[in-house]
Amino acid sequence: MTEFFNVLAPDEARALLLNHIVPVSGQEILPTAEALGRVTAVALHAPQPLPTFRRSTMDGYAVRAADTFGASGSLPAFLDVIGEVPMGQAAQVILGTGQAALVHTGGMIPETADAVVQVEQTQIVGTESKSPPYEIEVFKSVAQGENILQVGEDVPTGQEILPAGHILRPQDLGGLLALGITEVAVRKKPRVVILATGDEVIPPEEETEPGQIRDINSYTVSGQVIAAGGVPVRGGIIADNLAALQEAAEEGLADADMLVMSAGSSVSFRDMTAQVIAGLGRPGVLFHGVATRPGKPTIGGVAGGKPVIGLPGNPVSAMVQFDMLGRPSIHRLLGISHPVQQGLIWANLTINTASQSGREDYIPVRLEKTAGGYQATPVFGKSNLIYTLVNADGLMKIPLDNGGLLAGELVEVRLF
């Protein structure tokens, strides 16, 4: 057995891989209402100001601020309410000195008004009528512009509202639709071909014979691809045959933007993944081995700007390493300008946990919320035991140069 070569620290391996990836160029036009989670292909600019008219931020009275100066509870200002601005209509009321108009939250402000007095700071004088005309007492002065949204205060015309490479969130969809942007250009989702390898691997629907295992990784990695914004294409199970694996890899990569091969990444006479990646195109294998546990024998490579990742066969290792390398690779293919950090929390470790300096450990943990914060309890198990992940809420990180953590320490947990 040969030795591992070019083993890199995880951050170094990730940076090396990402620097060689060329983003996909394809884009498509989607209805804005259906674009949640997609990535903008071009920068978007406001075609008009928002708001397009001066609006009240609360129920009250549109006034000329000067008419309220000095008003107080003991010395109120008296104003004549001469009309009301109906919601959804232009303001037709023209205010003179000592006059006001009834307005509602979101309603248009008359051109001659420059402030709004909250209804709670007023009182109707001498009548039970709620319809103008009537007189009010104002118990608090207001300044010019108070309780008013000005034209373009949210977004001025022409301002960049979203950059290219932005993952569209619910609030982004609302902001675009508020400006009348009903269609948006988004990056096409990268296609990720996933190959499972090994003579012992069979489809999940088949009954296992002694020595056989069902294919797990094709399906767990498919879910991770979807979560990262890609389209998984399961390429089937390839036997431990160099020619068959090379052919499947070449066909898969030709039809996709990224290739993932599960198993065959350890260094042994049966493990051919690195050799296959080297034959796919330049620059080929960038590293074979990452200073992490689980997943040390992971391979990272690029062929023609497309990432190719060789994952260990153990399902825990495969999921952890895809999260470390596959997820950011998809984000780079999508041209995401500010990749979203997977949810992180800090929790108190419940038991001492050993590690080995010189590698970055990721240990499945269960989380419990208490009055003092989250408690993290490790779920120990070997990297071929999928239920260590099923029974966990996230992965606790033990930093590269840390020999272990003590009970009670605050630890970083990546949430699933």
Image (cartoon, grey):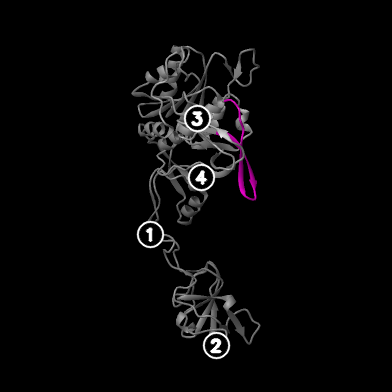
Mark 4 is on which residue type?
Leu
Which residue is labeled 2 in the image?
75
The secondary structure that dominates the magenta segment is: strand
Query: Could you say where residue 101 lies in the image, as x and y percent from the top left?
Result: 53, 78
Q: Secondary structure at mark 2?
A: loop
Query: Could you say where residue 241 lies in the image, as x and y percent from the top left?
Result: 47, 11
Which residue is labeled 4 in the image?
36
Q: Answer yes or no: do the residues labelled 3 and 1 have beta carbons within 8 Å?
A: no
Spatial CA span between label 2 and label 4:
54 Å
Which residue is labeled 1 in the image?
157
Magenta region includes residue 368: yes
Spatial CA span between label 3 and label 1:
56 Å
Mark 3 is on which residue type?
Gln
Mark 2 is on which residue type?
Leu
Which residue is labeled 3 in the image?
356
Q: Is residue 41 above or below residue 94?
A: above
Q: Secondary structure at mark 1?
A: loop
How dense is the environment of label 2, judged by Cα within 10 Å: few (below 14), some, or many (20 and up)?
few
Point 63% across, 79% down: residue:
130
Spatial CA span between label 2 and label 1:
43 Å
8 horizontally vs 352: left or right: left
